[in-house]
């Protein structure tokens, strides 16, 4: 008989060999085996039975060890997530229900990624998920919600699920259907919050049609019938909200709008505070991934690269995302950063046990340059009802030019020594102590941009890490390649992994590639 390698034997099915298969054909290694060495180089017939049994026994042991480790990772992360969820502050809405102040955004979260992201987020401690039918991923978000509820990771009452009725569904008869479709996709039997996504229906003419009143009254009936607990608006101005308030029998509970240091939206925030309407800040990081959808007048104005944001990040030892999320909390809003990256999903929650100093908060709250990222420009039409930005937002347009942006940075430079000079929080590198004006020089900005990229982490796809390998081989300390060397070194000297390492292992195991 021609020599058969183990790899050949694994591929040959017993029936294709004709008659009784040679013993080697029944020898197949589990596809979950850890990589020890290349079996294809070994002549199967030359392996004595006792060695073969030994290989199988050790393989079983390794798989059991790995499974136990992954269970431990899952449990550690679950417990850490529960602790975090327990200390998450919340806003009390009109009806007494509580909205966790940090939620996960899901706009632009790709199909094929978003289920894992939401499931991971719930394990990491998120209890608030922001959805919308127009994001075209509610069914996948719902798969994750269904999964975590079914597995008992959380109870339905612990979750806060928000969705939004899209522009094409504003007619009374369509509102209920749209809501029911979202409920079905999200696999829940009620929504905690349902918002009118935009004060836009796509009609032309002087008035919005169907009217906002018709839509709002249909939203109210959803509350009465128990499909949703609270209702509100998104992208509505104070004027448009006041109009709703004038006829509403169920008042708006929540106003979801763009808020971040480049668009503080203070007048609307104070209007809402006066009327008991809670504000949720969307695009809190400046929505860097939506520029192709909403082109910006000043593409250079990238919030996460702003030297002031970078400087505060350096001073606090936090990343730019955390600084901006913390700023949103201190600005009095709830906040819904989007991420499908496991370390950013978890990191964006790590903002509860520290705060921005009064001077850092003031620095981020005083930027003269203000610009909407999600500006609604696509809804403008010379035939109405929104012909200009002012029609849509009911406020005068601010100057949004590169010159205005540069002026703002220059003004910040002028006061940089006072505003930025008194850093305290544990940063002693030469950049922190460098004269502040340099921060805003072209060279300083380039440096800041490079730093921003490292702060916000590389988005490269690590195909090697995508593979399921021994979890310790995937932990940060050994993250280069899951190879046989990793396997042997782990076997020989097992390290006690930290919670962070366990969480990293677990997220890799869940299939995150970056
Ligand atoms: N009602 C509305 O009309 C409306 C409009 C806009 C947004 N929203 C809601 O608000 C959510 C958030 O807004 P958004 O999606 O526009 O943008 P965003 O949250 O401001 O920014 C999301 C982007 O930042 C990245 N990111 C996340 N955490 C980061 C961190 N710590 N450091 C660096 N980069 C980070 C994300 O990439 P990775 O995913 O790769 O981490 C993504 O590219 C939306 O998803 C949606 O739920 C609602």
Image: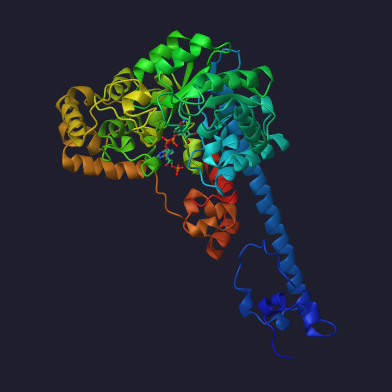
Q: Which residue is at the far right?
A: 19
Residue at (52, 39) in percent of width and height: 135
Identify whether 149 is placed above or below 483. above
Q: Could you tell whether 332 is left or right of 144 in the image? A: left
Identify whether 492 is placed above or below 322. below
* Residue 44 % position (x, y): 70, 80
* Residue 20 % position (x, y): 85, 83
- Is residue 370 visible in this depiction of the protein? yes
* Residue 297 % position (x, y): 27, 37
Q: Could you tell whether 512 is left or right of 300 in the image? A: right
Q: Could you tell whether 85 is left or right of 275 in the image? A: right
Residue closer to the observer: 249 or 438: 249
Image quadrant where residue 97 sits: top right
Quarter of the rendered structure image containing ligand 1: top left
Identify whether 315 is placed above or below 57. above
Identify whether 458 is placed above or below 202. below
Residue at (14, 26) in percent of width and height: 414
Residue at (60, 18) in percent of width and height: 220
Image quadrant where residue 60 sits: bottom right
């Amino acid at each position: 008989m021609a020599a058969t390698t183990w790899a050949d034997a694994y591929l040959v099915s017993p029936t294709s060999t004709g008659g009784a298969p040679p013993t080697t054909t029944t020898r197949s290694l589990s596809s979950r085996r850890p990589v020890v060495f290349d079996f294809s180089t070994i002549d199967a017939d030359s392996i004595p039975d006792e060695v073969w049994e030994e290989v199988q026994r050790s393989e079983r042991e390794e798989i059991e060890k790995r499974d136990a480790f992954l269970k431990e990772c899952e449990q550690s992360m679950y417990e850490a997530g529960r602790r975090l969820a327990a200390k998450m502050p919340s806003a009390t809405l009109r009806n007494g229900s509580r909205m966790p102040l940090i939620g996960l955004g899901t706009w632009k979260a790709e199909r094929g990624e978003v289920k894992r992201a939401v499931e991971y987020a719930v394990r990491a401690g998120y209890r608030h998920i922001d959805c919308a039918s127009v994001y075209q991923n509610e069914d996948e978000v719902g798969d994750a919600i269904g999964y975590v509820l079914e597995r008992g990771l959380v109870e339905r009452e612990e979750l806060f699920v928000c969705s939004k009725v899209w522009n094409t569904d504003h007619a009374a008869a369509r509102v209920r259907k749209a809501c029911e479709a979202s409920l079905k996709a999200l696999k829940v039997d009620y929504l905690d919050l349902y918002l009118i996504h935009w004060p836009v229906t796509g009609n032309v003419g002087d008035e919005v049609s169907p009217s906002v009143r018709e839509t709002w009254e249909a939203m109210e009936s959803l509350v009465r019938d128990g499909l949703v607990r609270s209702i509100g608006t998104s992208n509505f101005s104070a004027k448009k909200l006041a109009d709703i308030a004038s006829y509403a029998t169920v008042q708006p509970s929540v106003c979801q709008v763009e808020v971040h240091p480049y668009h503080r939206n203070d007048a609307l925030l104070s209007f809402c505070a006066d009327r008991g309407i809670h504000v949720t800040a969307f695009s809190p990081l400046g929505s860097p991934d939506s520029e192709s959808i909403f082109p910006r007048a000043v593409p250079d104005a990238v919030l996460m690269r702003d030297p002031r944001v970078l400087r505060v990040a350096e001073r606090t030892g936090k990343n730019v995302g955390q600084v901006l999320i913390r700023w949103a909390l201190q600005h009095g809003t709830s906040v819904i950063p989007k991420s499908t990256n496991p370390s950013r999903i978890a990191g964006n929650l790590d903002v509860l046990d520290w705060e921005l100093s009064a001077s850092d908060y003031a620095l981020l709250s005083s930027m003269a340059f203000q610009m909407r990222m999600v500006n609604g420009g696509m809804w403008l039409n010379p035939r109405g009802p929104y012909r200009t930005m002012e029609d849509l937002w009911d406020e005068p347009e601010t100057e949004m030019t590169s010159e205005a942006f540069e002026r703002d940075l220059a003004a910040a430079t002028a006061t940089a020594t006072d505003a930025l000079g008194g850093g305290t929080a544990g940063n002693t590198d030469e950049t922190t102590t460098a004269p502040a004006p340099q921060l805003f020089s072209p060279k300083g900005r380039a440096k800041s941009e490079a730093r921003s990229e490292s702060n916000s982490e590389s988005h490269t796809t690590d195909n090697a890490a995508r593979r399921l390998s021994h979890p310790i081989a995937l932990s940060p300390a050994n993250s280069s390649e899951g190879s046989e060397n990793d396997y042997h070194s782990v076997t020989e000297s097992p390290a006690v992994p930290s919670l962070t390492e366990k969480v990293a292992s677990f997220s890799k195991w869940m299939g995150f590639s970056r």
